[in-house]
Image: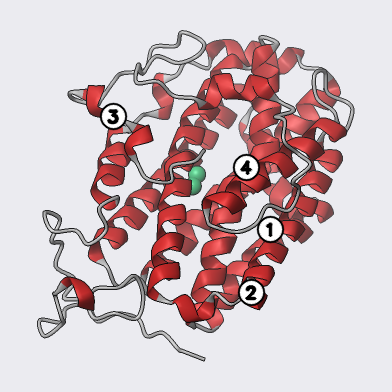
Amino acid sequence: MQTLNPKALFNPDADTRESGRTLIGGETTNLMMLSNNKYRWSFPLYKTMMQNFWIPEEISLGQDKLHYDRLEPAERETFDKVISFLVFLDSLQTVNLPNINEYVTLPEVNLLLNIQTYQEALHSQSYGYILESIVGAQRQREIYEIAIKDPYLLRRNRYIADCYQEFIDEQTEKGFAKVMMANYILEGIYFYAGFSFFYNLARFGKMTGVGTEIKYINRDELTHLALFQNMFRELRSECPGIFTPAFEEELRDMMRRAVAHEIEWGEYAFGDRIQGLNSGLIRDYIRYLSNFRLEAIGLTPLYPEEVEDPLPFIRQFTQFNQTKTDFFEEKVINYAKGGSDLDLDALDDFEL
Ligand SMILES: [Fe+2]
Ligand SMILES: [Fe+2]
């Protein structure tokens, strides 16, 4: 099994010709030759990620405190659990992405993973801002700690962290593909029962400031998905030997298990107790979503019967045109200069 070595900090003797530059296992000087990127998708993605800059505190949550206090008890309980899970996911990403990045031997991708890491940190900042806007200090800590004290959630979080831990313990080419898959699943599946809960509240006029925060987080997560989709495609062409039918089946199995866990989580966290959602809808939505995710990285969908989007209202929140005002008319500063060239569709395989 091909073992990977962490890259040297500076290697002036590395092969800088295009043929010598690879996603993993290559030699790299570590020079950022950003006018000469090997992957033509990398610079447009870099620009999009940079232009997506936003500040959580610019979204007013003044009304959300009132909304939170008026939520139905089941809604409030679910809200707390879902926020706690999202805090866990973004925290894990912030801490783990550098572990993946250490083995990536293309500086232009290192750059993108670094931006992703900073955005995951920004998402944690937004959860902190949300919690301090709606509850006192004692309750804030209790909500953070649901992720480690709720037995169901703890079990789930351990499983997710263990998938990442495998690559920390042993670094191989296949292990790299698997940790990429784990990352892709986290970005593309594990957020979505939670996101749909918040969007569902927002469409009933509840916690709309939080809904806006989530929308901006979601926009970042979509670029992270695009990053990993493209990395997958490059890995597949540079290391075709590892993508055997058996290994592809292993990757699909990871998705199958993830879908089952996310559906179970939806049942556990909100079940049929929330107006506008039920566990059947969440099940169909997560399966439907997984089909897109697998297709986007060249794998066969698991649920071909799921052809219709069961939660179409979510598209109102996740389709971004280039105006930077949000769905709820909140005003967020548009930091993009000349933002009209922000064209997400121009990115190859940017299937969201
Ligand atoms: Fe995030
Ligand atoms: Fe992310």
Judged from the image, the secondary structure of the residue bearing numbered disc 2 is: helix
The disc label shown at residue 86, or none? none
Q: Label 4 to label 2, Cα distance in Å?
A: 28 Å
Residue shown at 19% from the left, 58% from the top: 37
Closer to the N terminus: mark 3 or mark 2?
2
Residue shown at 52% from the left, 91% from the top: 1
Closer to the N terminus: mark 1 or mark 4?
4
Of tags 4 and 3, the one toward the viewer is: 3
Q: Label 3 to label 2, Cα distance in Å?
A: 38 Å
Q: Label 1 to label 3, Cα distance in Å?
A: 31 Å
Residue 288 found in image quarter: top right
Q: Is residue 3 above or below residue 127?
A: below
Q: Is residue 34 above or below residue 236?
A: above
Q: Is residue 337 left or right of residue 177?
A: left
Closer to the N terminus: mark 2 or mark 1?
2
Judged from the image, the secondary structure of the residue bearing numbered disc 3 is: loop
Residue shown at 35% from the left, 41% from the top: 347
The disc label shown at residue 191, or none? 4
Give the class, few, some or many, for how many residues have Cα within 10 Å of label 1's Cα (few <14, many ≥20).
Answer: many
Q: Could you tell me residue 62's position as x and y percent?
A: 53, 12
Instruction: Name the kind of residue labelled 2 in the image.
Output: Pro
Instruction: Name the kind of residue labelled 4 in the image.
Output: Phe
Instruction: Name the kind of residue labelled 3 in the image.
Output: Leu
Q: Could you tell me residue 308's position as x and y percent?
A: 72, 30
Residue 38 found in image quarter: bottom left
Residue under label 1? 255
Give the class, few, some or many, for how many residues have Cα within 10 Å of label 4's Cα (few <14, many ≥20).
Answer: some
Q: Label 2 to label 1, Cα distance in Å?
A: 15 Å
